[in-house]
Amino acid sequence: MNLEKFKQKNPKKIGISIFTVVCILLIAGIFFYTSFASFETKQDFNIIEGSVESNGDLYFVFYVDGVISKSMPQKGEGYILNTEKTTCTKGASVEFNETEWSVKVLNMTETRTKCTLYFEKNAT
């Protein structure tokens, strides 16, 4: 016959141990969340509404299929200028020549004029 120690489990001690582990995990989670959140940076730049340095500049904003673009689409890509949406500031207007694929600004009397051109795929 072997003699073994009989140890009765103490429910109070187990409850305290579980509570301590949960508290440590909770504190560690809060610490790591705040440390990661403190290093997050967001910067938004509104380039379209920026200012032009030299007076007398005329600048264009291009929208291709509703998305802003850095350049005007090339001739032969199947785009047309939507004249209803296209606008210019300070009373100027746009004349678009589809044959030469060129833009001419009319009635420009003031400096720093901005023209917004909307190009869409030709449905035909």
Image (cartoon, grey):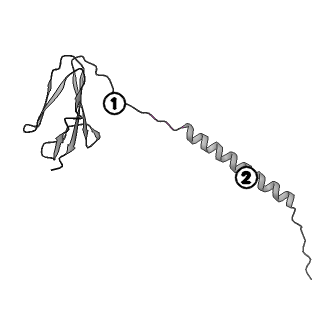
Q: Amino acid at mark 2?
A: Val
Q: Earlier in the sequence, mark 2 or mark 1?
A: 2
- Residue at the extreme left: 99
**Depicted 43 relative to depicted 107: above or below:** below
Question: Where are the magenta residues, as a range?
Answer: 39-43
Residue that appears at 16% across and 29% down: 94
Residue that appears at 21% across and 43% down: 120
Q: Is residue 42 magenta?
A: yes
The residue indicated by pointer 1 is 47
Using the numbered discs, state the Cα–Cα distance from disc 2 to disc 1 in whole angstroms: 49 Å
In the image, 73 versus 17, the foreground residue is: 73
Residue 45 location, quadrant: top left
The quadrant of the rendering that contains the N terminus is bottom right
Badge 1: how crowded within 10 Å, few (<14), some, or many (20+)? few
The spot of residue 13 in percent (x, y) is: 85, 57
The spot of residue 99 in percent (x, y) is: 7, 39
